[in-house]
Image (cartoon, rainbow, N blue to C red):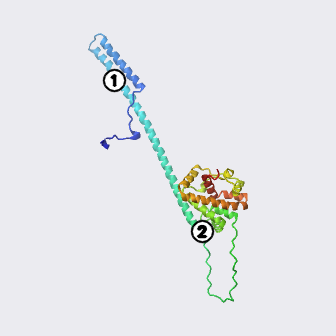
Amino acid sequence: MTDPQDKPLDLGLYARERLAALTPAEAAVGGVGLLWTLGVALHLMVGGEGGFFAHALAILAVLLPLGLTVAMVLFLRTIRVLRSENERLGVAVDAMRKAHIASQQGGAARVALEKRVEDLATAQHQLELRLAELCAPPVEDVPAAPRAAEDQPALALGRPRTRAPLSVADLVRALNFPETAEDRAGFRALRRALEDPSSAKLVRAAQDVLTLLSQLGLFMEDLSPDRARPEIWRRFATGERGKAISDLGGIHDKDALALVSTRMREDPVFRDAAHHFLRAFDRTFSHFAPQASDAEIIEMAETRTARAFMLFGRAMGTFD
């Protein structure tokens, strides 16, 4: 059994590559040196006799070019190795720089997303508290002491408490939800919409899907949908579907659409909330469109609820 400690250490990118075969330049230098050595040796063997000094010069003539040839080959090979190391070092530095930049960008984006989710959770909590305060029934005063029957005024029985109908402007404002905790007009419109049976289901369904989308990092105010003409919205209100109203799917953010589509396939709770929201939007808008002007329809299309409708409708193929 092989000992793991006997295995060579893998240095990856910084491992020194094995020396390759001779390059043409190295082979040419070596060939010239070899020819010179053979020529001088042949001359010594064929040539005539000479003294000691002549033999020393002959030996020097053989060894000196040979030594220079070897030194030149080693020098060329060293230059080649240094160039290769320099290229690999440059690639490594560039990879480390890109990884460092990507890490910094990813960390900044993650911190921004976490802060956005925390801010949304805080605003939602304040919204729920304000809604509970605004929607709480008033406490009636308890009479101090019973009075005689003849002294009591006649009670107006059978007369139900009437409320003013929800205006189009209030519905549009409610569908966009309050901007801040100090948005009194927005909270007032939201309270009226929750008290109206025809719009309360849509408002609650929109709040649910907006919360689910925020958990994915999707915020409707960050999307920039294409604006559809009011007549396209009116055709949708009368029941037309498919490509005839495809302009309503004005959101084409590929990342957002892919994220919503994937979540709908994998999360049944998310999918059920989306279907419930789309049905509620369909019913409410069918009642809203006939009494709204073109300007009010355009204003409604800019609300967070309408943008959520465009996003889910495009992801589910409603406009195909």
Name the residue tied to disc 1.
Answer: 67
Looking at the picture, does residue 143 appear above or below residue 316?
Answer: below
Front-most of 135 and 53?
Answer: 135
Under circle 1, the secondary element is helix
Residue 155, image x, y percentages:
69, 82
Q: Is 20 on the left-hand or right-hand side of 134?
A: left
For marks 1 and 2, the one nearer the N-term is 1
**Amino acid bearing label 1:** Gly
Name the residue tied to disc 2.
Answer: 131
Under circle 2, the secondary element is helix
Q: Is residue 116 visible?
A: no
Marks 1,2: beta carbons within 8 A: no
Residue 232, image x, y percentages:
70, 54
Front-most of 305 and 94?
Answer: 305
Tell me which residue sits at (67%, 59%) in the image.
300
Tell me which residue sits at (36%, 18%) in the image.
36
* Mark 1 nearby-residue class (10 Å; few <14, some 14–19, many ≥20): few
- Which label sits in the foreground, 1 or 2? 2
**Amino acid bearing label 2:** Leu
Front-most of 279 and 45?
Answer: 279
Residue 101, image x, y percentages:
49, 47
Q: Residue 64 falls in which quadrant of the image?
A: top left
* Mark 2 nearby-residue class (10 Å; few <14, some 14–19, many ≥20): some
Residue 294, image x, y percentages:
72, 57
Identify the disc placed on residue 77: none
Looking at the picture, does residue 219 appear above or below residue 148?
Answer: above
Q: Residue 93 falls in which quadrant of the image?
A: top left
Q: CA distance from mark 1 to mark 2?
A: 95 Å
